[in-house]
Amino acid sequence: MKNHAIVTGGSRGIGRAIATNLGSAGYNVVINYNSNSAAADEAAKLVEDAGGKAITVQANVGSTDDHKKLLGAATDAFGPVTCLVNNAGVAPKVRADVLDMPEESYDFVMDTNLKGPFLLTQRVAKHMIENAPAGAGHDTFGGQSIVNISSISAYTAHVNRGEYSLSKAGMAMMTQVFAARLAEHGINVYEIRPGVIATDMTGGVKEKYDKLIIQDERGISPIRRWGAPDDIAKAVRVIAEGTFPFSTGEVINVDGGFHMKTL
Ligand code: NAP
């Protein structure tokens, strides 16, 4: 089975770095995006320059109809999928106090960051089971994996974007539920928790985080720099390559040590 990854939100930021890194490992990569096709085309070129093959597929991860289209396009292009990276995600359009958060913001964030990835994973997991290599199961990892890109927000309460924290906390449990269910099929499931990473998503709060990470006397993380998209991509790549066959449901913090309590 040729290595074949779907990277949701693979057109920009962290997803683009994941796609490129998998491309350099020789993967066929499906770059999913929602609205910015030019960015997706640029990402596809980066994958091909790195040595992989790529297609781009427009699909809203919050829509189950689009899930069908995404998986169909992926299998038509490259055959069975061996790795799903649930990376696409959104911040609330407005950072509103949790007491004032509008219902539409809750639905927008939860549909994109949790309900969509959950239902896409359900679909892709069934596809992986149908296409599992002979012998895959408890005794043999089948080379198929699912990687969820959550956030330090899975355990950090934000009072001005509570719906984002909630979506990422849900993704943490989603990882465990699928890990427990898919172990008998030799499919491993992982959660990567990025810290503060320099992308479009954090562009609007750059000054705030420059201060918190670098300028304050005690920064919020022991490693006092912004994370780069490639920091996350390197972690995805080692997982996808099957480096941890006896680990599933695992959380990998890629956050400069933010998760530690220090005195
Ligand atoms: P980004 O720069 O804003 O890029 C988001 C990507 O997701 C784009 O490719 C975008 O495509 C796609 N996307 C958005 N909504 C989509 C939808 N409904 N359907 C399909 N694709 C969609 O974000 P990022 O910073 O790389 O974040 C990637 C992931 O890491 C997210 O899940 C985010 O929550 C998580 N994360 C980020 C940070 C950080 O500090 N940046 C920290 C922790 C976790 P279009 O351009 O076409 O919309």
Image (cartoon, rainbow, N blue to C red):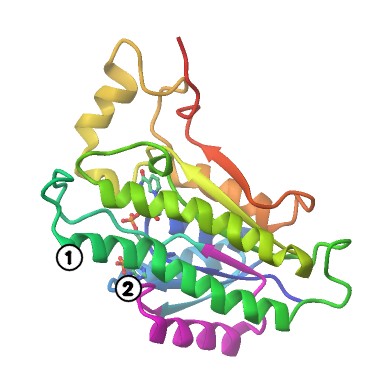
- Front position in the image: 243 or 49: 243
Q: Which residue is mark 2?
A: 34
From the top left corner, tell me how far across and down residue 214 is, in percent.
Answer: 32, 21
Quadrant for residue 23, please give it.
bottom right
Secondary structure at badge 1 equals helix
Magenta residue check for 100: no
Magenta residue check for 79: yes
- Front position in the image: 7 or 67: 67
Horizontal relation, residue 167 to residue 261: left or right: left
Quadrant for residue 53, please give it.
bottom right
For the magenta stretch, what is the residue range? Answer: 58-85
Q: Look at the image and tell me whether residue 186 can be seen.
A: no
Which tag, 2 or 1, sits closer to the chain's start?
2
Say few, some or many: other residues with alpha carbon within 10 Å of mark 1 (under 14 / 14 to 19 / 20 or more): few
Q: Which residue is mark 1?
A: 104
Say few, some or many: other residues with alpha carbon within 10 Å of mark 2 (under 14 / 14 to 19 / 20 or more): some
Looking at the image, the residue that sits furthest to the left is 100
For the residues marked 2 and 1, what is the alpha-carbon distance in whole angstroms?
19 Å
The numbered disc on residue 79 is none
Q: Residue at x 45, y 59 (%)?
A: 87
Q: Amino acid at mark 1?
A: Glu
- Front position in the image: 41 or 77: 77
Location of residue 21 with respect to 81 vertically, above or below = above
Q: Look at the image and tell me whether residue 61 can be seen.
A: yes
Pointer 2 residue Cβ closer than 8 Å to ligand 1: yes
Secondary structure at badge 2 equals loop
From the top left corner, tell me how far across and down residue 2 is, in percent.
Answer: 73, 75
Horizontal relation, residue 194 to residue 63: left or right: right
How many circles with numbers are drawn on the protein? 2
- Give the quadrant of ligand 1: bottom left
